[in-house]
Each structure stands twice: as structure tokens, then as C-alpha cells.
Image (cartoon, coloured by chain):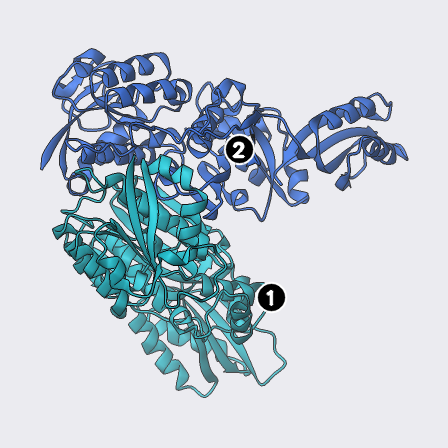
Chain colours: A cyan, B blue
Amino acid sequence: MKNVRVGLLGLGNIGKGTYTILTQNADRISGMSNSKIEVKKILVSDINKPRDIEVSKEILTTDAYNILNDPEIDVIVELIGGIDKAYEYIKAALSSGKHVATANKAVIATHGLELMELAKKNKVLLLHEASVAGGIPIITAMLKPLCGNDFQEIIGIVNGTTNYILTQMSENNLEYEVALKQAQEKGFAEADPTSDVEGEDAAYKLTILMLIAFGVYVDPKTIPREGITKISKEDIEYASQFGYKLKLLAGAKNSSGRLKYYVYPTLVPESHPLASVNNEFNALFVKGDAVGELMFYGKGAGSMPTGSAVVGDIVSIAKCIGTDLLEITPSQPYPITEEELELTGESRSEYYINFLVKDQPGALGKIMTVLGTHGISIQSVMQRAKGDDSLPVVFILHETRRQALDDALAEIVKNSYVEKVTSILRVLS
Amino acid sequence: MKNVRVGLLGLGNIGKGTYTILTQNADRISGMSNSKIEVKKILVSDINKPRDIEVSKEILTTDAYNILNDPEIDVIVELIGGIDKAYEYIKAALSSGKHVATANKAVIATHGLELMELAKKNKVLLLHEASVAGGIPIITAMLKPLCGNDFQEIIGIVNGTTNYILTQMSENNLEYEVALKQAQEKGFAEADPTSDVEGEDAAYKLTILMLIAFGVYVDPKTIPREGITKISKEDIEYASQFGYKLKLLAGAKNSSGRLKYYVYPTLVPESHPLASVNNEFNALFVKGDAVGELMFYGKGAGSMPTGSAVVGDIVSIAKCIGTDLLEITPSQPYPITEEELELTGESRSEYYINFLVKDQPGALGKIMTVLGTHGISIQSVMQRAKGDDSLPVVFILHETRRQALDDALAEIVKNSYVEKVTSILRVLS
């Protein structure tokens, strides 16, 4: 049995999970990898900080290069998060012929292609199963057992924070701010939740998913996205009355060579498998030309679930060490497509529109007329109970171009009977 | 790029799907495997039979050994089904140093350990992702990205035929016989549905799942099982009123060294992810000590979904050909446990009991008294509307030993006010 020596960069949440699994399930892991896996050194910011796991102080170091330059270490496990330092360390590791496993979506979404090239040049592996949806093995599934499929669509609920908030808003009739505070108290949202609630985190993950499913690189900054900060409990309630759940979706769809992608809060029909994914759970819905529709559901974050994926990558690397096969063929890290895909963020969609209109006869009819003259047809409409001077009117519109919708709305809001367009949301169709 | 030559045994449903995917997505598959994969010969029963796919007659043969003895063929893909012939051919292939991919649950559940040993001895791979739940990549997921987990439980809806029948009975209020006929007309059930509806097919798959999740071999014939032929639409309706869906589950649970396994029609709480798996869909629910709860959902049968899994295996084999690594380490085909697991089919469970009792005062109280004297406590009870001399009384019982339940029922049926025990079903807890 060979010895495989690992250097962990980071002993935060995921680092602790990874270390715990490697220790606790050592026999099983050594059987599966045919290796004795030893964590030789761990990078921390403070050696003497009290920790809730047992780890010998002798293997802790505050100097990353003490690990990166150790010739005995075969595998670097990068779990510090963030972009710049992680990028520097991964590059140093790959350049010196070390394999890398990382859980870092930001660095892979930003520098993945370059790092994969570097790994290939140095004949080492760079694996990142944990970078999308934590413990759910979506990346390995697409690269291995599903690799014969031409993927048509992938839709993910890939951010547990926002899914927790939206679920709580829906189930307990809470406003966004209240649900956010609750999520923070329960540890499901960070003190500064911006990256999660504005959809940036989901965009990173979508970039990685598109790389694997469609073989294209889309800069996460260019992905059209909306966060959930403006969602009201009324929108969630109205959506529910039309038979939909509101979810923050990260999706990409290949319609005959046109790749449409987005991160949007979206109305999901209650019959769709994604509609019942609640609270901190994540799910990936995948459509392949051979396999049809598949869904993967599980914990997308957290110490142990994410550690589970990291350990899977460490075992994959360990199995390859000392052989002449690198599991993800290094000559082709991702299945980069030769097909010309037209990339597009915007496109046709069904829409949910919530207007606030003055309570006067004929207002609804006038709105419907304007929508009609712009070629927009209406799927359903709901006028809310009165009791005030103004009242909400909610439409679900059939598929339409966004430009047509914007033109119609510009005309509608000019009329005195419309106070405002309260919200515009997409509907999954 | 290397050439990999494949011999297909069988051009039925799955054979056609596999051949179609290999042809249709050839570029993608060759990119993923770094190989040119050629189907050199195909075993059929009749060369001149009209077929709905385009395949050159020159590669068809009716003699399996014409393929098995061809020194140019690297990979045998066994898709003829059944046990004896498949076993013979796989053995011949492995013995002559050919890799094997198979979709055959019966042969793997029956002879898997022996065949894995043979593969190991000959330094070749024997992969069978398609043998459980068709296109859902559960086997690869457990052996690779989840391999660091100590699995605690696995529950599957792994038979599409029975799930289709139960869903139709539930949604359209059909009796079993009517739903079965409909399934046969739609191609979801075979002319002789015995293996599906009696749970034999599910038991084969459970044997394979237990091998991978718990590292133990349990003969499928020894798995306690009940089919769905005696399920009535009333049972499904009553279950629904208590908040449950009825599903045929194949499950195994490791409770501190005691492995309980079964194939039973089971009441699943509506909030459980398995409850919303309908019609021909399959799902696997897995609990690992690190990853927590995961669910995989998709098409468990059919030409293209099953072909998708077979092609995934062919690509895995192709990547390994000519290297010194066999992806599933040949020295250890499955993670056979060294832990002493006590195998047990029977154990404690919550139960659903449907009695037919005479409509006379006090009958319900008497039944409850007898249950109480046997230490069985009641979770809920429902007495159905009257209108007849006799009426159904339905109980959901808290967890109890089966022996205690049987003793209580023996005593209850002796009483004149009880006409019969209509049904006894387990409840997932």
C-alpha cells in the first residue's frame, strides 16, 4: 500500500470537516484508495487558537510555503477560500508537480481554465467536486457516468442561504429582512450576505457547471443575474396562488446552438422536482439527450457534506498517484466544445408581473389591451381583494421577448391608473 | 488517440440505446475518453430481423464466441439479460483478458463476487453502473465522490413498473389489475410481470446496492420481500388520508452493526423526498455519515437512459485501456467490510393495519385493548364511514416487533367482531 501525503491549506469549516472524515473513516478510505493517506501539514492563521477538533499542533503552520515547498507532500487541498491567495497557492502547487483538490468556486470560476492548463502541463490533477453544491456529486456525475450525454439543460438551486431565506419567507409568511436575520442567527447566512443574496455565489457555480456540461467558459461577471433582496412576501404568496414556488435558479439551456444562461429568482411550477427543494438543501436538475431528466438533491454546504466531496477528490488523486493515468485525462480537463454556441443571457421567458393600480373600473382592461398591442398574451391574471385606493394586479404572461415586455410596461406606467410595477419575475417553463 | 474495439452482446432495448448513443455522440465520447470507440461486432438472435436503427448487417453475428474469441475486441458489453448465458459469456470474456460492461442486475446480484474476483485475477474491469436504476449514476457516486462516507442507510425506488402502477392506482383511483393492464399497454410492464410486481427485480438491485454501500453480500433470495399484487386502492386512499404515499421500497439500514434490509410496499411520509417520485421514475435516497441525506432521481429504465449508463462505463474502461490503472482498484472490487455486520431481514417497524370489523359498539375499543396488552402503542386510528354491516378500521402503530404484532393479531382475529385483517403494511420512519 502506497503512502500519500496531504497538505491542507485552511482549517476552517470545510478544513475541519475534511480532516475529521479522513481521520474518522481512515480504514474505509485507505481501502477505497489503496493508500495510506496522511495529513502531513495544515495551514492556519493562528496555531494557538482553541479548536473544537483534535489535531496535533506539530502539524500546524502559518506559512503556506512551508507546505507548498515540502517535497514529501503529494496533494495540496486548498480550503482557504477567496480568489487571490488561493490562486497563488494552487498555481505554486501545480507548478511544482503537486496534485490539487479544492472546494473554491470563486477561484475555479475565475481562473479554472488557466489552472487546468497548468495541471495538464505538469501532468497532475486539479479536482474540485466540492466547488459546486457541496456534497452533491454533480461534477463527477457529468464527467464520468453521464459523459456520453449531450447535455441540453442544467438548472440548479446552488445557494443554500437564499433557498433557506425564500423557504422561510414562504412557509412562515416572513418579509425578506426578517428571514435573512433568522438565517444569520442559524448560521445559514454570513454577517455580510451580499455574495449570496445578490446571486454572485450562484453565478460562480453556474460558470463551473457550464464549463462541464457545455464545454464553454462564461465569465461569471457577464452572467445576467438578479438577487433576492427585493422579493416581497406578497410575491411569494401570489406565486403560490398561481401554483408556483419562488426559487433562486442558476440555469443554462442549449436551444439548438444558442446557450441561454441566468441567475434569477424564478417561479417554479409546483409539480417540478425543484419546487420541493427547501431550506438549506441544494439540487441540480440535468437534462441529457440520452439519460433524460435527472435530479440530484442534498446538502450544498456545511463542514461535513463539503468535506465529503473533498475527500472523494483526495481518494481519486490517491488512486492515480504512481500510475500513468490521471483520472480526468490531462490532455482535456473539460470537454471544451467545438460546436459554435451563441452565448446569450437574455431571451424569451414567461413572466410574472405585479402592478399596483388605482381601484377604478376598467384599469385591468386597459393594461390587458396594451399588453395585447405589444403581442404579449396573458396566461392568467389575479386581482387582489380591495379595501384600499389602490390594489395589486398580478399577471402570468406567456413566453415573450424581454424587449416587448419592457416596451409594453413603459407605455402602461405612463397611464394615471397605474401607480407602479411592483415586481417582474421570470417563470420556469 | 487510441482505438478501442467493442463487442455488443444483444441488440434489444438497451443494446439499441447504447449503439445509438455511441454513434450519435461519437465526437463528445471520443473527446471524453481520448479514444476512438468502434463497435466491431454485435450478437443478435436473427441477422435479418427488421430493426428500427441503422446498423450494418456485416457486424451482426448469431455466434457469441465469434465476438468473445475475437482478439481485436477489447471490451465486451453484455446486454442479453438473464443469468446463465450472460454468466457464461462474461466469464469467457474476463478469462480471455477482455474488459466487461454490463447492465445485468440478475447476473451481478447472483455471481458478482465471483466475476469480480475473476476480473481482478485477469487485471481487467467489470463495470455495471446500469445494473441499478438505469440512468441514475448511483454506483459510481458511491464508489467515487462519496467513497469517504460510512453509509448508514440506502432506500431505493428501483423498479419503474411497480412505481408506475402504484402512482396510477393513487392518482386515478384504480385497482391493481387495471393499473397493471395500463402499464402493460404503455410498455412499462412486461407480459409476465412477475419479477417486477413480486419484488424480485428490486431484490437483485438491493443486493448490488448493499455490496457497494455496506461491503456485504446478501443473496437476493434471502431478502425478505413482499410484492404489490395484494395492494388495494383503499389502502392507498387510507394511507393518503394519514399523510403517506405507498411506494415499493428496497432498503437497507445499518443500525450500530445490525444491517436490516427488505423489499416491501411501504407507507412513505408525504414530506419525505421519496414520496414525490412518481410513475416510471426511480430514486435513490442515501444517508452517509459525512454527506448527510442525498437523493438521486431519474429514469431507471428505458433504452436511452440505461444506454447512457452503459456508455459511461465504456468510456471509463476506454480511459484505462493501455494504462496501468484500473479505475476500480482490481485488488478490491467492492469495499468489503471487515466489520461484523449482523444481517437481519426482520426487525422493528411502524405498521399500518387495516381491519374489517362488524359494525357494533365497542369493537374499536376491544382491538385497542388487545394491542395495548401486547405492548403495542397506537399512533393514529381511523374508522371509516358506515353504511354496511362491517366497516374498515385502520391503525398506524408506533414501532413494534413483528412478533408482538403477530401475537396481537392472532388474538384479535379470534374475536367475533373482527371479520379479517385486510392488510398489514410497513411505515417508513
Closer-to-camera residue (A136/B365):
A136
Closer-to-camera residue (B38/B317):
B317
User: Which amino acid type corresponds to the residue marked 1 in the rendered image?
Assistant: Asn
Q: Is A80 left or right of B287, judged from the image as shown?
A: left
Q: Mark number for residue B251? A: 2
User: Which amino acid type corresponds to the residue marked 2 in the rendered image?
Assistant: Gly
Above or below B402: residue B31: below
Residue B281 drawn at (x, y percent): 44, 38
Q: Quadrant of residue A370?
A: bottom left
Chain letter of mark 1 equals A
Q: From mark 1 to mark 2, how far is it between C-alphas?
A: 34 Å
Q: Is B34 left or right of A421, judged from the image as shown?
A: left
Q: Are marks 1 and 2 in contact (CB under 8 Å)?
A: no
Closer-to-camera residue (A112/A198):
A112
Above or below A174: residue A316: above
Of the residues tagged 1 and 2, which is closer to the observer? 2
Closer-to-camera residue (B179/A185):
A185
Residue A204 seen in the current view: yes
